[in-house]
């Protein structure tokens, strides 16, 4: 058992709790103390709920005490987790990183959160996000800028940067994020943790504050691949409250975890190794693919020819859906209302004008233009047609291979402020992740090395729709064969540096 309980993975903690070696209150308090020690620097959390977390932990301890040692227990009983602040938790503020929802406290919660609670999880609080999940750096939050635990002068990625940074800093044992165009995988790569984007419809979106409804998916961020499999097992499944939820059985994802990749076919797309990539990223990803081959996988070249169109297609479809989804924030029904509004039009104009930040306004305007009369066919409809071609590329590739291996991000974490005034440069951070969402398939980011500045690099493994077992298998085998998961960032704790796992 480690000296600091916050170092534990979800599975390690669950095992110790079941054996009564630690208590849930003891574990939760250790993680809260860790948050108090490091989050002033990292700024991963927007809302922390220590009282309710400790109460939930005490309930878990009573359940543990009442059960026989051999009695099956909920898989997450007493395990403290964090939730991205676009996912509703009943009675806990849900701001979506925006001033327009500053005072909103939902009276119900997301299906994914309900499933975590049914599995016994303790909810620590809500993590920071780019406003309405629109961003790649968590700099677009209306409240704070989250910092990368590996280098506090750099971004953690986005939009699930708060969740990724919290996991990397051991300020929770795992977290939920959301992925609309890479927002779980990209921050996972930049923060050196595991991030899984499930297939569209695999996890219910009920209780998720919508950005782009045909793209959004809830997924876990964890310290290792086995924990990602466990959390997906808990939150996956059909939900009648979400009309896009797939009525498909949930397999045993943990059973797919094996170090043997014999018989697995891994495709490598040339379109994902482009000019302008950071050399260290390409070297690390190609070295990771070689490890997969050493583990028994058959590595073949595949082509995804429409990949260059993914970025413009995404930035037509996602803003168009955002324009429609965010029309509900009008200053009338709920959310922020400007105090100086005197007429109906004042309410709309002033409330939305001051409630939304610049990136959200930019995307609303892009989307409204793409949907407007005279431009719909030329922009939105054409983008949907090309989206079909992107999906067909993946369908064809998965006729030949089980998994596709690629980079997650073209660079490692960039300095805070470097791209804020250059939206196109910021959008390019997701160039390798967008197509996965457009096609509705699944993807995972697993640490695969570090650059010359000691910043993490992620390997992306992409699977077909409902192919999570295959990407988890490949990710787990790679993780077990390499040392990257052992390295953890060094953070100052009460003014003193603390190597979380005694590394570097």
Image (tube, helix red, strand yellow):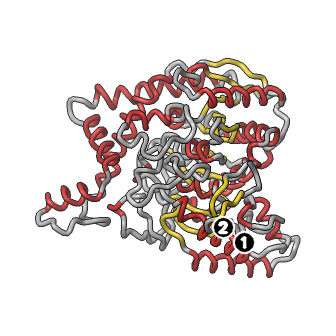
| Label 1 crowd bin: few (<14), some (14–19), many (20+), radius 10 Å | many
Asked if 335 appears above or below 312 in the picture, the reply is below
Who is closer to the viewer here, 75 or 409? 409
Residue at 28% x, 34% y is 370
Query: Where is the N terminus found, in terms of image quarters?
Result: bottom right
Q: Is residue 361 left or right of residue 281?
A: left
Q: Position of residue 233 (x, y in %)?
A: 69, 53
State yes or no: discs 1 and 2 in contact (Cβ < 8 Å).
yes
The residue tagged 2 is 80
The disc at residue 27 is 1
Asked if 412 appears above or below 493 in the picture, the reply is above
In front: mark 1 or mark 2? 1
Who is closer to the viewer here, 117 or 94? 94
Cα distance in 3D space between marks 1 and 2: 8 Å
Q: Position of residue 222 (x, y in %)?
A: 67, 53
Badge 2 marks a residue whose secondary structure is strand
Asked if 503 appears above or below 274 in the picture, the reply is below
Q: Quadrant of residue 35?
A: bottom right
Who is closer to the viewer here, 454 or 240? 454
Residue at 29% x, 65% y is 336
Q: Position of residue 335 (x, y in %)?
A: 32, 65
Question: Would residue 116 be seen by someone viewing this image from the given angle?
Answer: no
Residue at 43% x, 69% y is 106
Residue at 82% x, 70% y is 18
């Amino acid at each position: 058992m480690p000296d600091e309980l916050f170092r534990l993975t979800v599975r390690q903690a669950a095992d110790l709790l079941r054996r009564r070696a630690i208590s849930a209150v003891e574990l939760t308090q250790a993680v809260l103390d860790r948050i108090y020690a490091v989050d002033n620097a990292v700024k991963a959390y927007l809302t922390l709920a220590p009282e309710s977390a400790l109460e939930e932990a005490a309930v878990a301890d009573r359940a543990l005490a009442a059960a026989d040692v051999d009695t099956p227990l909920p898989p997450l009983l007493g395990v403290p987790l964090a939730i991205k602040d676009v996912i509703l938790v009943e009675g806990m503020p849900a701001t979506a990183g925006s001033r327009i929802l500053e005072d909103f406290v939902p009276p119900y919660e997301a299906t994914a959160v309900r499933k975590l609670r049914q599995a016994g999880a303790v909810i620590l609080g809500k993590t920071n996000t780019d406003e309405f999940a629109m961003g790649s750096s968590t700099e677009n939050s209306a409240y704070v800028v989250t910092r990368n635990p590996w280098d506090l002068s750099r971004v953690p990625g986005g939009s699930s940067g708060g969740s990724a940074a919290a996991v990397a800093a051991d300020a929770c044992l795992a977290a939920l994020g959301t992925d609309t165009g890479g927002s779980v995988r990209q921050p996972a790569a930049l923060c050196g943790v595991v991030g899984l984007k499930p297939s569209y419809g695999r996890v219910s979106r009920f209780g998720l504050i919508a950005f782009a409804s045909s793209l959004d998916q809830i997924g876990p961020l964890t310290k290792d691949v086995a924990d990602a499999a466990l959390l997906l097992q808990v939150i996956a499944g059909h939900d009648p409250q979400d009309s896009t939820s797939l009525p498909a059985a949930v397999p045993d994802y943990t059973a797919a975890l094996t170090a043997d990749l014999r018989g697995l076919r891994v495709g490598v797309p040339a379109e994902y190794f482009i000019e302008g990539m950071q050399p260290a990223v390409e070297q690390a990803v190609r070295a990771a693919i070689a490890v997969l081959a050493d583990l028994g996988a058959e590595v073949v070249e595949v082509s995804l020819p429409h990949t260059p169109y993914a970025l413009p297609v995404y930035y037509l479809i996602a803003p168009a859906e955002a324009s429609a989804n965010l029309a509900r924030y009008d200053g009338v029904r709920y959310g922020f209302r400007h105090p100086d509004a005197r007429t109906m039009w004042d309410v709309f104009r002033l409330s939305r004008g001051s409630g939304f930040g610049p990136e959200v306004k930019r995307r609303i305007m892009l989307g409204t233009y793409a949907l407007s009369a005279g431009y719909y066919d030329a922009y939105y409809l054409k983008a949907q047609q090309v989206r079909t071609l992107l999906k067909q590329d993946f369908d064809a590739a998965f006729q030949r291979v089980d998994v596709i291996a690629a980079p997650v991000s073209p660079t490692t974490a960039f300095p805070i402020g470097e791209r804020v005034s250059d939206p196109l440069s910021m959008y390019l951070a997701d160039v390798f992740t967008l197509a996965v969402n457009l096609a509705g398939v699944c993807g995972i980011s697993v640490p695969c090395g570090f650059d010359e500045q000691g910043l993490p690099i992620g390997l992306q493994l992409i699977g077909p729709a409902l192919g999570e077992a295959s990407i988890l298998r490949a990710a787990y085998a790679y993780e077990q064969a390499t040392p990257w998961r052992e390295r953890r960032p060094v953070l100052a704790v009460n003014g003193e540096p603390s190597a979380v796992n005694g590394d570097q």
